[in-house]
């Protein structure tokens, strides 16, 4: 089995998006770092949207970066922000599910 990469990976997604992939294990701490990075990136004026995944973050830009230096800056800032874990705000939602044969029969006629 291959070990996870030790450094972040960055991939361009067209001209207006960047995918940041976090290094390390696939665990809650890595997820919390992604949340922290997403929260940080949302405040950057150049970022239109920050979309967190489990171990990655997609950033869409308001305007396409004009130079590689701009992308390198985003990479440095992303790496620094991703080093700090952000605890989750958890909300539990209970959904009552009923298995009533009469109700199932009614749905067949809809």
Image (cartoon, rainbow, N blue to C red):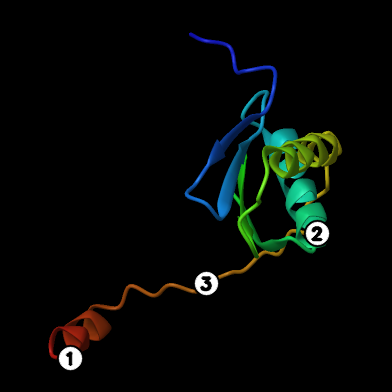
Q: Residues within 10 Å of mark 2 (few under 14, many from 20)?
A: few
Q: Residues within 10 Å of mark 3 (few under 14, many from 20)?
A: few
Q: Earlier in the sequence, mark 1 or mark 3?
A: 3
Q: Which residue is mark 3?
A: 95
Q: Is residue 96 toward the left or the right of residue 98 in the image?
A: right
> Toward the viewer: 4 or 65?
65
Q: Earlier in the sequence, mark 2 or mark 3?
A: 2
Q: Is residue 43 toward the left or the right of residue 4 in the image?
A: right
The reply to whether dot 2 and dot 3 touch (C-beta < 8 Å) is: no
> Toward the viewer: 67 or 29?
67
> Could you tell me residue 108's position as x and y percent?
14, 83
Answer whether residue 54 is visible to the viewer in this image: no
Q: Give the image quarter of residue 29.
A: top right
Q: Which residue is mark 1?
A: 110
Q: Which residue is pictured at 62% across the width and 18% down the height?
A: 5
Q: Earlier in the sequence, mark 1 or mark 2?
A: 2
Calculate the distance from the C-alpha at mark 2 to the C-alpha at mark 3: 37 Å
Calculate the distance from the C-alpha at mark 1 to the C-alpha at mark 2: 49 Å
Mark 2 vs mark 3: give the one in front.
Answer: 2
Up-down relation of residue 98 to residue 92 (above or below)? below
Q: Which residue is mark 2?
A: 44
Element on which disc 3 rests: loop
Element on which disc 1 rests: loop
Q: Which residue is pictured at 51% across the width and 10% down the height?
A: 2
């Amino acid at each position: 089995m291959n070990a996870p990469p030790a450094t972040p990976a960055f991939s361009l997604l067209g001209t207006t998006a960047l995918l940041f992939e976090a290094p390390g294990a696939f665990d809650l701490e890595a997820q919390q770092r992604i949340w922290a990075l997403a929260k940080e990136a949302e405040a950057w004026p150049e970022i239109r949207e920050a979309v967190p995944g489990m171990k990655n973050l997609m950033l869409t830009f308001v305007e396409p970066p004009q130079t590689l230096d701009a992308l390198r800056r985003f990479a440095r800032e992303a790496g620094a922000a991703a080093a700090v874990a952000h605890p989750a705000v958890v909300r539990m939602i209970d959904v009552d599910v009923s298995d009533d044969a009469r109700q199932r029969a009614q749905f067949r006629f809809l």
